[in-house]
Image: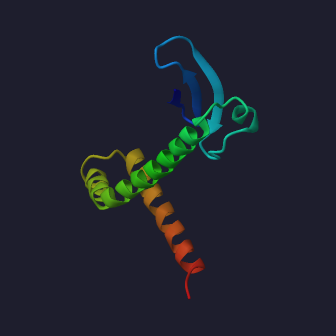
Amino acid sequence: MLLFIDEPRNIKIVRQDPDGGARVPLGKIKKQELTVPEDMATQLKGTELEEIESAFDLLTEGEACRIKGTVAGFPITIREVLSYYKDVATPAEQRWILSAILEGLRQVRRHDREHAA
């Protein structure tokens, strides 16, 4: 049985007997790449490659869902941030919020110009 241990930049792959016993580390896979390195592929048994590829699919789908959730909640977030800005933010927090909004608008406008027509 393979275990997938989430790390900030990698997925650590470990083999463990379902009945317990020692874990056998197989290696780490970079989240940005999601490809099985050749040295790890040679250590895999039976359907373990398919297990890893299924985990890759799950990670990809999960990230897409997370981003969609963030987008769906963005109007609420911006409304709450603007309320905070007006009501209680310190001058430093106001600059922080304003900087983020202006940078976001700059990037949106640039994207729209590049993809216009």
Above or below residue 88? Residue 46 is: above
Q: How is the image coloured?
A: rainbow
Residue lying farthest to the top in this orientation:
21
Q: Which residue is nearer to you in this view: 64 or 99?
A: 64
Above or below residue 20? Residue 11 is: below
Q: Can you give x and y, in whole percent of width and height, for residue 112 in the image?
A: 52, 77
Question: How many badges with numbers are in the image?
Answer: 0
Q: Is residue 82 left or right of residue 14?
A: left
Q: In which quarter of the view is residue 37 placed?
A: top right
Q: Is residue 42 left or right of residue 20?
A: right
In percent of the image, x 57 and y 79: which residue is there? 115
Q: Can you give x and y, in whole percent of width and height, for residue 89 in the image?
A: 32, 47
Q: Which residue is nearer to you in this view: 91 or 69?
A: 69
Q: Can you give x and y, in whole percent of width and height, for residue 78 in the image?
A: 32, 58
Q: Which residue is nearer to you in this view: 68 or 61?
A: 61
In percent of the image, x 75 and y 38: which residue is there? 38
Instruction: Look at the image and tell me in which quarter the C terminus lies.
Output: bottom right
Q: Can you give x and y, in whole percent of width and height, for residue 29 in the image?
A: 64, 37
Q: In which quarter of the view is residue 114 placed?
A: bottom right
Q: Which residue is nearer to you in this view: 78 or 1?
A: 1
Residue lying farthest to the front in this orientation:
46
